[in-house]
Amino acid sequence: MTPSAPSLIQPTKSRVVAKDLRALLGVEKVLDDGPALTAYAVDASIYRVPPQAVVLVESEDDIAATVSYAVSRGIPLTPRAAGTNLTGSAIGSGIILDVSRMNRILEVNRKERWARVQPGIVLAELNKQLSAQGLLFGPDPSSGDMCKLGGMIANNSSGPHTLRYGSVKDNIQSLRLCLTSSSWIEARSYALNDPMLERLLTSVPALRDVLVLTQAHADLIAAKQPTVSKNSCGYNLFAVADGLAQGHFDLPKLFVGSEGTLGIVSEAKIMLAAKPAATLTALIHFQTLEEIGSAVPRLLTLHPSALEVMDANTLNLIGRGNHGIPDDAAATLLVELDADSLDVDLREKADAMVAICRSYKLASELTLAFDASQREQLWKARKALYPTLYRFDAKKKPINFVDDVVVPAERISELIRYLEEFFGGQQVPVAIFGHIGNGNAHIVPLLDVNDTGDFQKMVQAYQEIHATVLNRFGGSICGEHGDGRIRAGFVKTMFGEELYDLFVQVKKAFDPGNILNPGIKLSEAPFTDHIDYTRLSKSCATCAKCNSVCPVYDVFQSEDMSARGWFEIVTAKDYSYLDSKRVIESCLNCKSCRTICPAGVDVSDLILQKRAEHPNRLTGWIFKRQAHGAAFEALLRFLGSTQHIWDRPLIRKLLDRITAPFMKALAPTARLPHDLVLPKLAQRHLRERHGHLIPNGTDSSPSKTVAYFHGCAANYFDDGVGDAVIEVLKKHGVDPALPPQRCSGTPIQTYGHVDLAREGAWFNLRSLAPYETIVTGCASCTLMLKDYPTLFQDGEERQQAEALAKKVVHISEFVARSAERPPMAKTHRTTKRVTYHSSCHLRAAGVTKEPRQVLSSMPGVNFVEMQDADRCAGGAGTYIVKDYNTSQKIFDRKARAIMQTGANVVATSCPACMIQLKNGLGDSVQVKHVAELLQDAYRAAEREKN
Ligand SMILES: Cc1cc2nc3c(=O)[nH]c(=O)nc-3n(C[C@H](O)[C@H](O)[C@H](O)COP(=O)(O)OP(=O)(O)OC[C@H]3O[C@@H](n4cnc5c(N)ncnc54)[C@H](O)[C@@H]3O)c2cc1C
Ligand code: SF4
Ligand code: SF4
């Protein structure tokens, strides 16, 4: 009789677990409040399982203490990294052990090409850092911007470039693991006659059990080994048996792909590859699917590093128009070729590829990209494919349950045809894409699982497709995503009872109490258990792409302090502001999540809506005074004229204390730290300095066509930005008007005052309506003015807001598009090395290239791109005061990136970011607005002329 998979220990629901863990690890590392448990109840799968407690481990001691506690109390323990798996393997009903804070690169050996890393490091971060040394870690899941090494190892992940680099299992030298027996092992490949192996087998009997059972059942294991090029289903006894036959016990092969069910990885020694010297990416649109089947083997002769396919349905679903895909393309191939040295001529290879493709009916010419940013564009749609499908329909969502099959590569067209017929019969839209070079297809049907009919179709498709892949194609049900909860129930069908029995014995040897990730990989439970029906009718794909750019997540490395977690928290049925205030008030409203989300979700807006239910009283009082009172401006002028007195170190220390209770009304974390470098307040505001540009109050049709919307900062601060914008405009032949204006509304909305924001917007709409172009100098004002339509449901206001949005241009856009080319200085005494910090709100407004274009075109400027240019600097309006500590932690990363460039000037497009940059950088690097640098260049030209 086949023993069944170990049963799940059901823990008693109680807060004792978190209390005990706090006593063991300290309060900072343990979470069990409602919002945290809500955020940790999901990963990128279709499931939801709320845990009892979350531990944010920071060291091996933390891991050991948590494992030992869970074992002693019989509580399930689920390791978790980024939570991007698609199978439900990073959620569990007991303790979640989040390794995200263990995210360091411990050592890099460039010569021998290996690195020691911790499991919490994000793949993209790792490769960014290795890139400086000309190295990379090869396996590249499409989730590489967010997934972490621990999860990749546990899932044996791979990706488009498996053809060149293999899966994770091919790239690991050794692992450090904590077992449930409380032992730590170094899992590497040991020669069978190595005395160290004997000592290890004696101290860890589970290892001897596995060795013995693998040797004893070598024939069975060999007979059941999948013959396709990739497999991550079941435990990899196949590689262990192969190793034993060759005289070594290859432990990494056993643990890689074990999905956190055998031990917890605290460190990995990974193998690195040399970065290719050059790369070519090609997009090829085929008119018939069948021809792809014949083209693939021919393209493989060119030794591509990646060969990806998207079928016709996928192209329809992601929107052909958005990606320039011809209407008659039946399938699209993405091919990548690498050159190991600059001697290899990729153009010759491109010619060979074109020659191969010429024999097929193509829907258009091949698109060839050699340049990094063009290549990135070609990959963009492919990498964000799954979450992008969330945009397709409000109810029918892409459901991952047959998402990872592998068949022989040469039969992939046959598989796609079969799947199209199958889903056509079910009348279910489906996206089929994947790593065609490996025969690994990702199949994502769009279903409304809350509809009984669709639910039944899902169950039928699960059984039939998996069975067909096994019986007709001789394939595997899992290439790289892992078995998780989804495929656990089908592992026995895939391998048969005898081999399944061996898997169960392996699990029992390491984890007799079934503590580690129960229900994952081996289970008798139906795959429909724990489906999150509520979430699957929401707009978020839980892909975690937003977490990869969320500055708060970057600092806390905790799901309850992240964009994805906040989506879960604010849309939860039992959401309450009071319970969630801690997290809801932590968002910077930087909008980075909105800019990046492939599914079109705006988490920042959801948070603002919740804040609007509880507007902050103190700021409401201030904003009202600002909107209506000359007294407000008079006070600012007074503060400006006395700043030389009150802005001294001693007085600032006093002010820090005196203002403390007042600041608490802003937020519990708010402070006015004495060492914060405040911007200089203007004694004469911009509008007073340029009074002649203010239109006559009675003039309803002004002669000027361009208005400058300066916003609050440029008006009240003596930061030079407003004057520079006006001067630059004049150089470009424009005499701008300064029509009456109120705060654009960004800070007002951030503190929950939607009505006030709307009132100000309406004022601005009327004031700006007569002008053809509205120039801005502030990133936040640019975005807010463009976003005004979201403040008004319909009616005249909405129409005016839409009209205004089209007229708004940031000064850098204005200059980049201007036909005028005012002279700039030809000679410069010193060349400035300038880097650019791209303000989040300007990115959200879609302005990214123009500031860089402007800077690069300036004589005497050596423009250097900064690695983290697109990451938030942590200023975000008043956030620097609202939560100074977090704001500074966010800035640390930006400061490192700026220093790495060696720049002596950092340019930006936003006065608010300038405050943060000036405060954080001190005198080490000059901070300038793009308009100020232009102003300098034009003035220098004037001086040269004279
Ligand atoms: C949009 C999108 C695209 C994707 N594309 C690909 C792709 O191209 N190829 C691919 O292979 N996958 C892909 N995936 C799936 C997923 O991203 C990968 O499996 C990824 O490697 C998981 O990493 P993670 O950090 O998110 O791990 P998690 O989801 O947190 O965890 C995954 C597993 O690892 C275990 N685990 C985590 N840390 C440890 C540890 N320290 N010790 C032991 N066990 C641990 C967990 O218990 C769980 O079983 C994609 C996912 C998404 C959302
Ligand atoms: S909000 Fe968007 S980016 Fe974030 S998890 Fe949801 S779908 Fe992904
Ligand atoms: S707006 Fe910024 S801080 Fe807020 S959730 Fe989005 S990315 Fe995070």
Image: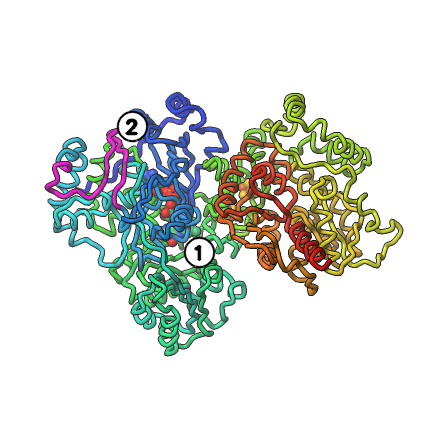
- Secondary structure beneath dot 2 equals helix
Q: Is residue 634 above or below residue 132?
A: above
Asked whether residue 390 is drawn in magenta, I would say no
- 870 vs 162, left or right, is right
Residue 383 pos. (x, y %): 44, 56
Which residue does the numbered mark 2 point to in the structure image? 71
User: Considering only order in the chain, which callout, 2 or 1, is on the residue closer to the N terminus?
Assistant: 2
Magenta-drawn segment: 173-197
Q: Nearer the viewer, residue 114 or 756?
A: 114
In this view, the residue in front, 542 or 398, is 542
Q: In the image, what residue occupies the spot 33% across and 32% down?
A: 76
**460 vs 175: above or below:** below
**Hey, which residue is sitting farthest right in the picture?**
698
What residue do we see at 41% from left, 44% from top? 122
Q: Is residue 727 left or right of residue 324?
A: right
**Is there any visible trace of residue 538 in the rendered image?**
no
Quadrant of the frame with the N terminus: top left
The quarter of the rendered structure image containing the C terminus is bottom right
Q: Foreground residue, 201 or 39?
A: 201
Q: Is mark 1 within 8 Å of ligand 1?
A: yes
Task: Examine the image and state in which quarter residue 809 appears.
Answer: bottom right
Q: How many marks?
A: 2
Does residue 190 belong to the magenta stretch? Answer: yes
User: What is the secondary structure assignment of the residue under circle 1?
Assistant: helix
Check disc 1 and give the amino acid type: Lys
- The x, y position of residue 748, in whole percent, is 69, 39
Which residue in the protein does label 1 denote?
383
Amino acid, disc 2: Val
- Relative to 722, 516 lies left or right: left
